[in-house]
Image: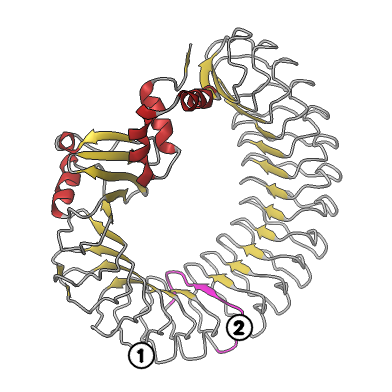
Amino acid sequence: MFTCIGESLDLHCLAFVSSRLYNVGKSFLDIGNKTTDEQQQQQQQQQSRKTLELPIIPGYLPSTLQVLNITQRSPHQLEPGSLPASLSTLTINYIGVSILQPGSLPASLTKLKLENFNQVILHGVLPQGLISLWTGNDFDKPLHAGVLPASLQYLHLGESFNQQIVPGTFGQSLIKLYFGDSFNQILHLRTLPPYLQSLTLGEDYEQPFIPGALPSSLTRLIAGQSYNQELSPGLLPSSIQYLSLGDCFDQIIQADTLPSSLTELIFPSFYNIPFDVAVLPSSLQTLELGDHFNQPFGVGVLPQSLYKLILGMKFDQELLSDQLPSSLTYLSFGRNFNQPITPGSLPTSLTTLKLGSRFNQQLAPGALPPSLTSLKLGRAFDQPLTSWMIPSSLAHLKLYLFKANVDSLPKSLISLRVYDVDKQTLTPGMLPSQLKELELGLVGKLQVCSGALPDSLEKLIVPSNYQQPVPDSLRHMYIKVDQKIPGNMLQSFSVRYPYVTNYHFIRVSNREYQCARIIDPKTVLLQVDGKPAYIKNINDLTCTPCWST
């Protein structure tokens, strides 16, 4: 049997997800006035996607079907001709035991995903026009030469695959190849396709790269977490632009080892070896160093092309003048950093600065460059904020503690996020008049005087116990909740703030959300975590939870 989206409720849901949330209510109300042509068009869209189980009788599925999900619970064969020639995307979940036969998949198929699948793929099974293949996490069978079609461009071999790759396995069209965590086979010469652009190696991969085995077309390489082999000059193709080395990598990198075209370099965790001058290529734009890196940067080590530098948890080195390149625009420190920032130690090009949770140094006049537009101060920072500390260019500010004077915040500020405002009082004029986004964390005994929140505010993010005034012009409120939303929470918020029409409930633990749009005083449109929306009477929410689990 199969289920399709032809029932009235699903028809409404289809209309909802086809437009933005603020237009959804109108779309729902207009459904009853659809013309015959519009109804036929919606029916055709519904017929383009189905979910069913085997067996499938040839001719049973509509000839316009494009996307199909099959769940196989019994050992039925997928017979040739049972799938329509219009099908482009197919997902098969093999709960039973069966083998795909040559001719069982239509030639129109371009995307195939196999789940719970661990069968040998025979010659002629995969259509010659297939572009994308995902074999699932159970697949661990040899791939014989000629089995994969020459048209294949994207191949995802799942977490169990650990078979030797022989020359001729991959076609020349393959540009993106993913190996799962179990793969740990040597990649010999001529085993990788000549035009491959992206290669991902899984967690267990620890084999050395054979010189010449990585194709000259490769632009993206992700080495496995276990990879810890020496990298010699010329081993990596000069075409690589993105390189991520695994957690175990701790080899010294010599000059001329990293590709000259490299723009992004990632060291995930344990690397803690100082860099010599000329090791990092002059093309490098982004450098991310893992949590264990805690080495000083000598003058000239970081190339002048670098614009983004991310330092991990343990980094706590003194910042000296001319250490950081003049091209740098983004700088992020980890938890342990707590060194003084003196005038001239940060480049004048810097626009974003993130200081970790232990930073608690007073900021001298001119320490923050006038180019800065975004600043984050961590949990330990409790230094007084004064107007001469913060540049007038700042647009985004994130604080843990709020201790600002009336004239402390620059007028240019448009976004302010504060974790702890407990026992504080916000008065008119304290917040910049241009502020558009405000997030408050622990509000406790916070007092917000009437008019303290500027009329310019477009987005207010608060915890569920917030009960202070908001501007009448505010239309969007984001409410942070721990678990379920009590059914009467929306009703109480809508009564307290009658001018707010859009509520967004955010589950803090995993950032899931529920949107609620007030259509009129009695009607609310709900959408949970991006799923299809539905309409409810607001009075029906007083006893039932809004959140779906």
Q: Quadrant of residue 390?
A: bottom left
Residue 276, x across and y down, in percent: 69, 78
Which structural element holds mark 1? loop
x 59%, y 32%: residue: 137
| Quarter in which the C terminus is drawn | top left
Q: Does 199 sit left or right of 212 as displayed?
A: left
**Of the residues shown, which amino acid type is indicated by label 1?**
Trp
**Of the residues shown, which amino acid type is indicated by label 2?**
Ser
Q: Quadrant of residue 245?
A: bottom right
- Tell me: residue 78, above or below residue 285: above
For the question of whether residue 549 can be seen, the reply is no
- Tell me: residue 352, above or below residue 39: below
Disc sitting over residue 500 in the figure: none
Outermost residue to the top: 57
For the question of whether residue 245 can be seen, the reply is yes
Which structural element holds mark 2? loop
Residue 42, x across and y down, in percent: 48, 27
- Tell me: residue 110, above or below residue 261: above
- Tell me: residue 409, above or below residue 41: below
Q: Residues within 10 Å of mark 2 (few under 14, many from 20)?
A: some
Disc sitting over residue 388 in the figure: 1
First reached walking from the N terminus: tag 1 or tag 2: 2
Q: Which residue is mark 2?
A: 326
The magenta-colored residue range is 321-337
